Image (spheres, rainbow, N blue to C red):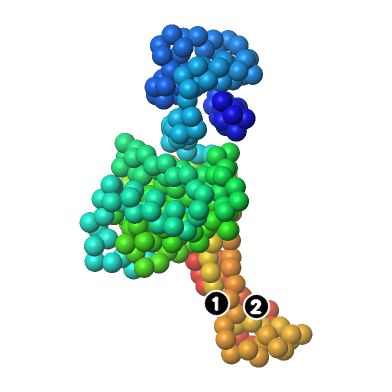
Amino acid sequence: MDTSNKRLIQRLMSRIPIKMLRTTLGKWGRLTEVQLKSMNLTQSKWALTEKLIAICEENELEVKHLTELEMIYIIDNPNQGMWHTFQLMDPEDDAQSVELTQFKEQFKSHIRELVRQVSVKMKKHTDEAVWIRIAWGDAFSRPNHLKPTYVVHHLQTPYVFVTSLTAKQKPLLSQALVLSTRHQAIKDANLSGRKLTAIRDLMMRQYQQVFPTKYPSPLTEHNPTVSNPHIGREQAEPAANRLQMACEAFGGGMLPQLQSAVYKLETKFRDQTNKTMTEREEPFKCVVKFASTNLLESLRNCASSGRNYFVITDNGPGPSSKTDQPQN
């Protein structure tokens, strides 16, 4: 076994928790029952890694087998790294008829036309998602299996979820996806997070059950502790309205754990010290980014506390210019 394969095993073993090791190796199916039992989980990670390397050498396993093991672990534990969402645009007439075999053949063909040295492995998950592992190389180097890109796509949907993609690789992947899915273009959906299931369910509207358009009334605010009854009555109606608004927008259940959302805005630039920009007729384009460990939960808390919208204004002379009011 060459050095690169040993390094790949070492990297895999460093990521897989010991408590998950036997189950993951069992799913892999490349070890005999005797070999699997010989992996003594009471040993150190280093000792287990050396043992697995020896078994892989004995079984004459190659890089294609080792990447299978990595895919099994990543598919079962997708909430690692940062996932970014893309949306396919302008489907052709036959886009809905693209099936798995056709997609696999077309994607591999197109990506290999664009990149001379590339390794592509695909696996269909039980939830119908197609998982793609891409190890990139170039004209002068073999594919780097230590830094693969992962792509998740549900056929017949416009959404693609990607992690570990560089700026150089992005146009290559985009072109291969557009051609193999029979679309005309692809765009950044400006939604990212560490929890793949959260951003996937939100984009594919699998969280509708916690976003009701109606919420039963009346509602009571949690822990209403007001000492003065007159103040309590005065505050009750606005508090109930705020809670009603939050529940109608977000529901009362668990929310997808998103980390960021980006709003692209156009407004009038106003700054008396910068006449060049102020006198431009074209709108001033800007980006507003919201970030949190749980963005939707933070926005729900803002709504229930009365901060239920955001207004961007300027302090220059003349009427204030409201450019956007993203509702929570």
- The residue identified by callout 2 is 314
- Give the label, 1 or 2, closer to the camera: 1
Q: Please say if 157 is above or below 79.
A: below
* Residue that carries the numbered disc 1 in the rendered image: 266
Residue 24 vs 263, above or below: the answer is: above
Q: Is residue 289 visible?
A: yes
Report the side of 95 relative to 264 (left or right). left
Secondary structure type for disc 2: loop
Q: Residue at x 46, y 19 (%)?
A: 59
Left or right of residue 138, residue 238 in this image = left
In terms of sequence position, does the residue under pointer 1 or pointer 2 come before the other? Answer: 1
Q: Would you say residue 237 is visible in this rendering?
A: no
Name the spot of residue 81 as percent of width and height, x first: 56, 43
The crowding category of the residue bearing disc 1, from other C-alpha atoms within 10 Å (few below 14, some 14 to 19, many at least 20), is: few
Assign the N terminus to one quadrant of the image. Answer: top right
- Which amino acid type is marked by label 1? Glu
Q: Residues within 10 Å of mark 2 (few under 14, many from 20)?
A: some
Marks counted in the figure total 2
Task: Name the residue nearer the viewer: 67 or 78.
Answer: 67
The amino acid sitting under disc 2 is Asp
Instruction: Indicate the quadrant where residue 156 lies.
Output: bottom left
* As drawn, 14 above or below 262: above
Depth order, front residue of 160/55 = 55
Image position, residue 271 (x, y; %): 71, 83
User: Which residue is painted at 53% across and 65% down in the image?
Assistant: 263
Which residue in the rendered view is the most extreme toward the right?
273
**Distance from Cα at disc 1 to Cα at disc 2:** 13 Å
Residue sticking out furthest to the front = 140
Residue 252: percent from the left, percent from the top? Answer: 41, 45
